[in-house]
């Protein structure tokens, strides 16, 4: 096999999934990245997750690298709407039982299809797998709002689901794809946990190949790619993997290939706080608010709070007093508007790994494995 220099840009779960599979196949590479973990980001003491918050028991690939912390469950939710404050499992829920049963039946069906797709997705693209499954294909291209109407879930959504799901989408859940809508609701039937990711364990086989840096420009001369970093270093490679979010990939590749049409992104702001919540909000776990308020507050196991909000910073509405540990934003957090797939191999030696087609830690990690498989095939062809 001819020696080829491979560079992966990005060490979120997509880049690390790709690196893991290449390393298992003894293919040399370098990773250049601004950080390790990307949108799996913790507070400086490593205790509180500022990005990805939970994983389910179905995330078999990332589960080997996480310490499960607490059960994340709908039953821990407190809702606030129209001046009323109610618990997830209260008398108000009774009138929603028929809709709830319809939803549960759908969730069990959806889970079976997702499990089947995930089993093959390290070797076949999510696009091919979803398009070949008529049930998932319809859901992928259907807006959750239409799905909710079709299954008579409007009232359940208005009273419970839209608030619960704002915390996952940071937007009205009716605007996202039905696959994403059901994907997050799987937490109702599959045990889900907050977690601590063990990046040491995952990166140990290729730790020496990780370079911290930020790539600002990529050009191509002859057959080599030339990568310039913010601090002035220049790197060259034959095979380039961009394992960054798609907006970043489009920008970085703008001198090399036409930008791809991508889904719309959703921004969100967050606080990590110590403080005292006002009376109706002073609950043990999660506070969910009407989607017009665009907010969610969770009490963390160390007694601190995470407060995520969309447009309006309402910290003084919810807290009597507070001390800020961190205040930042994700721009964007996730790409949820639309149903485009991306081409993960837009040029013969350029590969993309990310969570664009199917967003989540598990699916980003699997997608990285898939990208590595494409590279292995390319290298085999060149032998
Ligand atoms: C607030 C929030 C909550 C979420 N909640 C959940 C959840 O509960 N469960 C779940 O499963 N998923 C959740 N997700 C989604 C999940 O975090 C992502 O799907 C997944 O982590 C994406 O991994 P990735 O590797 O594709 O991208 P990223 O994690 O974004 O990784 C990209 C990598 O590229 C690097 N990079 C970017 N630009 C450059 C550059 N110019 N030069 C060098 N390196 C660069 C970054 O430093 C990073 O390491 C959440 C995300 C957010 C933001």
Image (cartoon, rainbow, N blue to C red):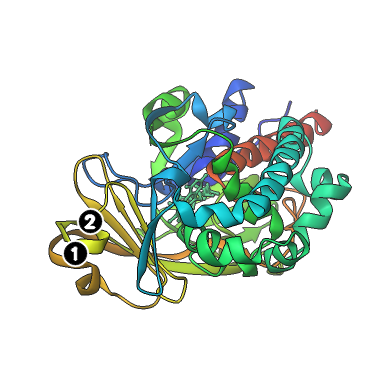
Task: Examine the image and state in which quarter residue 313 appears.
Answer: bottom left
Residue bearing the label numbered 1: 278
- Badge 2 marks a residue whose secondary structure is loop
- Badge 1 marks a residue whose secondary structure is loop
Residue bearing the label numbered 2: 282
In the rendered structure, the answer to whether residue 116 lies left or right of residue 64 reads: right
Q: Residue at x 44, y 70 (%)?
A: 290
Task: Examine the image and state in which quarter residue 347 appears.
Answer: bottom right
Q: Nearer the viewer, residue 130 or 112?
A: 112
Give the class, few, some or many, for how many residues have Cα within 10 Å of label 1's Cα (few <14, many ≥20): some
In the rendered structure, the answer to whether residue 352 lies left or right of residue 306 reads: right
In the rendered structure, the answer to whether residue 26 lies left or right of residue 277 reads: right
Task: Examine the image and state in which quarter residue 296 appears.
Answer: bottom left
Percent x, y of residue 49: 34, 46
Give the class, few, some or many, for how many residues have Cα within 10 Å of label 2's Cα (few <14, many ≥20): some
* Quadrant showing the C terminus: top right
In the rendered structure, the answer to whether residue 157 lies left or right of residue 350 reads: left
Percent x, y of residue 13: 52, 41
Q: Are marks 1 and 2 in contact (CB under 8 Å)?
A: yes
Q: Nearer the viewer, residue 3 or 100?
A: 100
């Amino acid at each position: 096999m001819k020696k080829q220099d491979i560079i992966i840009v990005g060490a979120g779960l997509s880049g690390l999934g790709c690196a893991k599979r290449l390393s298992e196949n003894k293919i040399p590479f370098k990773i250049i990245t601004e950080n390790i973990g990307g949108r799996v980001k913790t507070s400086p003491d490593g205790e509180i997750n500022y990005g990805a918050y939970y994983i389910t028991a179905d995330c078999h690939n990332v589960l080997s690298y996480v310490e499960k912390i607490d059960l994340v469950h709908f039953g821990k939710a407190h809702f606030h709407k129209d001046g009323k404050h109610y618990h997830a499992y209260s008398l108000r829920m009774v009138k929603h039982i028929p809709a709830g049963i319809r939803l549960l039946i759908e969730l069990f069906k959806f889970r079976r299809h997702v499990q089947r797709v995930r089993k093959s997705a390290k070797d076949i693209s999510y696009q091919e797998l979803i398009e070949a499954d008529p049930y998932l294909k319809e859901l992928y291209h259907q807006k959750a709002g239409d799905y909710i109407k079709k299954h008579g879930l409007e009232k359940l959504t208005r009273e419970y689901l839209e608030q619960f799901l704002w915390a996952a989408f940071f937007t009205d859940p009716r605007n996202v794809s039905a696959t994403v809508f059901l994907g997050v609701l799987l937490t109702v039937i599959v045990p889900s946990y907050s977690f601590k990711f063990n990046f040491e364990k995952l990166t140990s086989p290729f730790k020496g190949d990780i370079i911290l840096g930020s790539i600002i420009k990529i050009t191509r001369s002859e057959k080599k790619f030339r990568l310039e970093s913010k601090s002035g270093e220049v790197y060259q490679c034959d095979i380039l993997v961009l394992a960054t979010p798609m907006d970043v990939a489009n920008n970085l590749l703008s001198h090399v290939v036409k930008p791809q049409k991508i889904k719309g992104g959703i921004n969100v702001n967050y606080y990590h706080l110590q403080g005292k919540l006002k009376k109706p909000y002073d609950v043990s776990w999660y506070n969910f608010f009407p989607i017009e308020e665009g907010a969610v507050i969770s009490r963390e196991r160390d007694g601190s709070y995470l407060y995520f909000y969309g447009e309006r910073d309402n910290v003084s509405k919810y807290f009597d007093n507070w001390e800020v540990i961190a205040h930042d934003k994700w721009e964007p957090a996730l790409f949820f508007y639309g149903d485009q797939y991306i081409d993960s191999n837009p040029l013969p030696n350029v590969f993309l790994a990310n969570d664009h087609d199917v967003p989540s830690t598990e699916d980003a990690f699997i997608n990285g494995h898939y990208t590595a498989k494409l590279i292995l095939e390319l290298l085999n062809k060149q032998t």
